[in-house]
Amino acid sequence: MNNKDIWRYCISLLLLTQTIWSQESPPEEKAAAAVTDSIAPATIPYTLRFGVDLYRLVLSQASPDFSGQELVADLRVYNNFYAALEIGNESKTKQYEEVNITAKGSYFKLGFDLNMYENWEGMNNQVYLGLRYAHSVHQQQLNAYTILDRDPYWPRTEVVNNFATGNREGLNASWAEVVVGTKVQVLKNVYLGFSARMHVLISDKIPENFDNIYIPGFNKKTTDNKFGASFNYSLTYSIPFLRTAKKKKD
Amino acid sequence: MHPKRFHFFTLVLIFLLSCEKDDICIPETQDSPKMIVLMRSFENPEIRKVPNDFKIRAIGNETPITASSDSIVLALNPEKEFTQFEFITDFEKETENIDTLQINYRRADIFISSACGYRHNFIFESPAVTQLNPGSDWIFGFTVLKDTISDEQQGHLALLH
């Protein structure tokens, strides 16, 4: 574990305690809602929420090897059903075992979220499950690598900017995601969210004499070439832009 | 979904996400191949022929090379486009004869995995072998058996003497 991981834990724990706090609600509110129930049935606004991923924003400043951003948006279309979209780009340089790479690209993730959490009256928090289809367009640059030679006769050197190094452009990848997340209302129109995702790779265009070691949006491709994981912390602002109010005439 | 169960599940997920798995290069993975040279009779290249009191030295490297049978494993220098070897017959005898041969090739690095890196492949140039000290040769010719050295499954070069 390094310092970055410790920070992730602390911030995640803080967010979770936020969720617990938000569940507190004075019992009088619930009673008042029951009394006024017969007069005005629920209005269901279409609500658009958009914002940014704070984790990537902070990491871009904190790390010289990473720059990127992710915009998140969701649209409440019906009851607990939200259409969701994330768009981002990343540029990441990292040493992965025997290869040093820089991966750059953009991605989008499109899907829906289902809120599983029963809100008390007047609150709007979410604990949701979601699905996404995601696609990235990216490039992989091999900066340096080592040679596998168990019984070297001649002196071994690491290869930098020679032979197989170089940029492979025009790559892409598609995958599906299962999302588990929470969005907590911190101010009237402001939400803090955390989501964790499991990815399953559908297809990818593999570069010549190399591989998609890191895919923006998917993270590192593992040896079984199929699964990946990621998360985000989002700060979003909501706009209700269309109200379909059903009012009973007395 | 019950909030407490969800929080536990999320904590487990956070833990899993924070650990980046490191792939391992398993020992069975094929590494960079060496060149396999077969010593054959010049009169009849199908016949194996081990030279008398045979010894091989690489120029530029003191590490001894085993040359006990008709099939020899020689490591090509990946940092250069040629490697020079002294092929010696009747070693330390009066009739000792040294042929200095230069093997000419191109290097290509082939991807294995992020855990293993790359391995060398060598592609023979034309001509694959040049005699550096012509005159009273004991090796009269050569045949390229496989023009790309990508594994050690078979002989790549036959030297005819």
Image: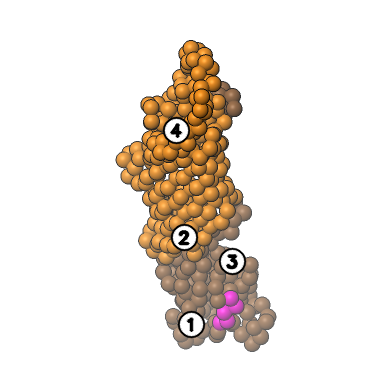
Chain colours: A orange, B brown
Q: CA distance from mark 2 to mark 1?
A: 39 Å
Residue on which disc 1 sits: B127
Residue on which disc 2 sits: A171
Instruction: Give yes or no for residue A183 being in the magenta stretch.
Output: no
Question: Which one is nearer the viewer's eye here, B12 or B51?
Answer: B12
| Chain assignment, label 4 | A
Question: Which one is nearer the viewer's eye here, A227 or A186?
Answer: A186
Question: What is the span of residues highlighted in magenta in the rendered image?
Answer: B142-146
Q: CA distance from mark 1 to mark 4?
A: 67 Å
Establish whether labels 2 and 4 are both on one chain.
Answer: yes
* Front position among marks 1 and 4: 4
* Front position among marks 3 and 4: 4
Q: Secondary structure at mark 3?
A: loop
Residue on which disc 4 sits: A193
* Front position among marks 2 and 3: 2
Question: Which one is nearer the viewer's eye here, B12 or B87?
Answer: B12
Establish whether labels 1 and 3 are both on one chain.
Answer: yes
Q: CA distance from mark 2 to mark 4?
A: 31 Å
In primary-sequence order, the first of circles 2 and 4 is 2
Q: Amino acid at mark 3?
A: Asp
* Front position among marks 2 and 4: 4
Residue on which disc 3 sits: B151
Q: Amino acid at mark 4?
A: Gly
In primary-sequence order, the first of circles 1 and 3 is 1
Establish whether labels 2 and 3 are both on one chain.
Answer: no
Residue A156 falls left or right of residue B30? left
Residue at image coords 61%, 85%:
B42
- Please determine whether, in this image, residue B102 is positioned above or below residue A160: below
Q: CA distance from mark 3 to mark 4?
A: 53 Å
